[in-house]
Image (cartoon, rainbow, N blue to C red):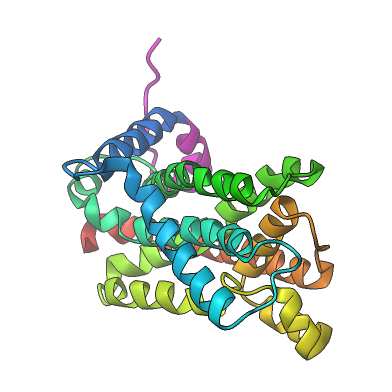
Amino acid sequence: MMEKLVIEAGRSEAHYWRDLWRFRELFGFLAWRDILVRYKQTAIGVAWAVIRPLLTILIGAGIFGGLAQLPSDGVPYAVLVCAGTLPWYFFSSALSESANSLVGNANLISKIYFPRMILPASAVVVAFVDFAISLVILGGLMLWYGVMPSWRLLTLPLFILLGFVAAMGPGLLFTALNVKYRDFRYIIPFVVQFGLFISPVFYSTTAIQERFGDTGRVIVALNPMVGIIDGFRWAICGTTDIHWPSFALSTGLSVLLLVLGVWYFRRTEKTFADVI
């Protein structure tokens, strides 16, 4: 039996989260549509999901590992950089794609009702597909350098889930802001580029701790990506322990940003169709 959608005045808050579940097929359709068209009419297709992070890994390993001789926590430097680059690319792609998801679907928003949160959420799923494909780089590097995974690798899905949390919060916030203030389409690339250098992608947070102590490592953890990257390296490389105070701070900020993003998105959602 086909379900009926009933829109009641003043009851949007009560039905919103239930409607997210009822529109799950639309969520799947939008995500699948974006996956199909993402590399349409490109010469090498989904290989771009591997080439982009691979180039970053090679350049980072060559400059910071080869020239700067940064410490690598007892693992090949390329593996260390790869374990930081892949979650960062997932976060940056999810942030960029979700921030433009409402503006890119303006015609759909102005014509029919559905929970608008479906659009940025589906964009994050598309970024995750790219991330899953790019994991072949990590597997290849570990095989090349003879790095054997330990039982810690079983915890990797937990850190991937944390990556979803970290991406959704800022993604929802920038999505809502981008609808009202189109300046954010210029700000977001700058945020992504700047974030690459303040995140421990090309260096280990243990190096920060050795130079500045526990206080320095906790200050660095004000970046939500620190906990995720450290978690990835702990699960993949298995050579260092997690610094729990900084991990807890980073994770707490990710959750806080998610709550803030959901709150602001819901607060401004009713105006999207008029403003966009």
Residue 107 location, x and y as percent? 17, 47
**Residue 143 falls left or right of residue 24:** right
Q: Position of residue 169 (x, y in %)?
A: 53, 61
In the image, 219 versus 145, the foreground residue is: 145
Indicate the quadrant where residue 266 lies: bottom left
When the figure is inspected, residue 267 is found, relative to residue 140, above or below; the finding is below
- 156 or 59: which is nearer to us? 59
Does residue 161 sit above or below 247 in this rendering? above
For the residue pair 30 and 133, the one nearer the viewer reads as 133
In the rendered image, which quarter contains the C terminus? bottom left
Quadrant (top left/top right/bottom left/bottom right) for the N terminus: top left
Left or right: residue 252 compared with residue 1: right
Marks counted in the figure total 0
Is residue 63 highlighted in magenta? Answer: no
Residue 90 can be seen, yes or no: yes
Q: Is residue 10 magenta?
A: yes
Q: Is 215 left or right of 95, judged from the image as shown?
A: right
Picture residue at 44% right of the left edge, 41% below the top = 129
Q: Quadrant of residue 54?
A: bottom left
Residue beneath the point at 68% across and 73% down: 204
Picture quadrant where residue 23 is located: top left
> Is residue 265 visible to us here?
no
Query: Going 38% across and 57% down the picture, which residue do you hit?
Result: 52
| Residue at x 62%, y 44% (from the top left corner) | 143
Residue 128, horizontal then vertical, whole percent: 47, 46
Instruction: Report x, y in % for residue 157.
Output: 66, 43
The span picked out in magenta is: 1-21
